[in-house]
Image: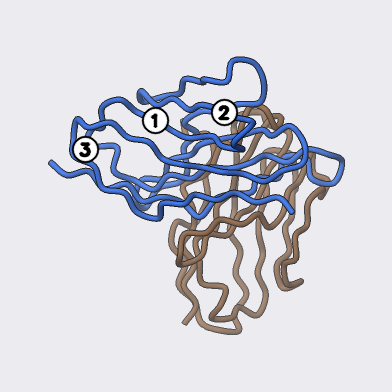
Chain colours: A brown, B blue
């Protein structure tokens, strides 16, 4: 069974559209994250939720809105997509800091 | 500010040779340190982690890393590299504290190429 899954794996869309990426974890972890990996493979955290509560919100445009319906799911909705949003988005989960984070396979978003 | 530096952007080693990937960090508190591997088109897989105890930690796939507080380093090593080890390697510092708990700061990554 996949521990952290994301859908879709690939997403190609035009500027100005709104899109969502879904993430689910079956590890029973309390905390989930969204990371963005740019074209130079640099990884940066965007958001973190603990038991459905937002705990980390980095300097991310408010076009990005995470939603956690329950502690096993953390979705990312992006409004008015821009060219610069093209990247790979990774979802991750963890039980606590010391145990490390477990990453999903990523969603490659291409905005044309 | 917290930061992680991986000085080597790209490393090429021959299969069977030993490997060391460097990682230096800047963090005011006791660090939680991690190494992740990313194969092409894949997510990140946790190789090993350190936050206390023995400064030499063993991970999966035959990797180990040594924490050296005096040098602010956490270098990754493997005695004999296999062709399947070709991938991107990321070092990360885990932040703790009420507003940062769980946040990982990643290095720029090191691309490992393995020659036959």
Give the residue at x 61% y 54%: A35
What kind of element bears circle 1?
A: strand
The residue mark sitting in front, 2 or 3, is: 2
Number of callouts: 3
Quadrant of the drawing holding the C terminus of chain B: top left
Give the residue at x 51% y 20%: B57
Q: Residues within 10 Å of mark 2 (few under 14, many from 20)?
A: many
Report the Cα–Cα distance between label 2 and label 3.
Answer: 26 Å
Give the residue at x 73% y 64%: A65
Pointer 3 chain:
B
- The residue identified by callout 1 is B77
The residue mark sitting in front, 3 or 1, is: 1
Give the residue at x 66% y 59%: A76
Query: Which of the two discs, 2 and 3, labels the residue nearer the N terminus?
Result: 2
Q: Position of residue A97 (x, y in %)?
A: 70, 32
What kind of element bears circle 3?
A: helix
Report the Cα–Cα distance between label 1 and label 2.
Answer: 12 Å
Pointer 1 chain:
B
Q: Quadrant of residue B16?
A: top left
Q: Quadrant of residue B51?
A: top right
Give the residue at the far top of this rendering.
B54
Q: Residues within 10 Å of mark 3 (few under 14, many from 20)?
A: some
Query: Which of the two discs, 1 and 2, labels the residue nearer the N terminus?
Result: 2
- The front one of A79 and B31 is B31
Report the disc number at residue B67: 2
Report the Cα–Cα distance between label 3 and label 1.
Answer: 15 Å
- The residue identified by callout 3 is B83
* Above or below, B96 relative to A40: above
- The front one of B12 and B86 is B12
Marks 2 and 3 share the same chain: yes
């Amino acid at each position: 069974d996949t521990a952290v899954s994301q859908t879709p794996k690939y997403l190609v869309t035009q500027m100005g559209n709104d899109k969502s990426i879904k993430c689910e974890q079956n590890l029973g972890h309390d905390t989930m994250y969204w990371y963005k990996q740019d074209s130079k493979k640099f990884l940066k955290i965007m958001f973190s939720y603990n038991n459905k509560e937002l705990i980390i919100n980095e300097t991310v445009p408010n076009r990005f809105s995470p939603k956690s319906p329950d502690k096993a799911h953390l979705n990312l909705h992006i409004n008015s997509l821009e060219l610069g949003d093209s990247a790979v988005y990774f979802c991750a989960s963890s039980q606590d800091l010391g145990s490390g984070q477990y990453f999903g396979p990523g969603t490659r978003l291409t905005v044309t | 500010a917290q930061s992680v530096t991986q000085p080597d952007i790209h490393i090429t080693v021959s299969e069977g040779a030993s490997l060391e990937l460097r990682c230096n960090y800047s963090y005011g508190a006791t660090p939680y340190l991690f190494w992740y591997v990313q194969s092409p088109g894949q997510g990140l897989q946790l190789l090993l982690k350190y936050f206390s105890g023995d400064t030499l930690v063993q991970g999966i796939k035959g990797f180990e890393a040594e924490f050296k507080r005096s040098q602010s380093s956490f270098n990754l090593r493997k005695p004999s590299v296999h062709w399947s080890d070709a991938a991107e390697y990321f070092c990360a510092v885990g932040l703790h504290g009420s507003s940062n708990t769980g946040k990982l700061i990643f290095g720029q990554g090191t691309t490992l190429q393995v020659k036959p």
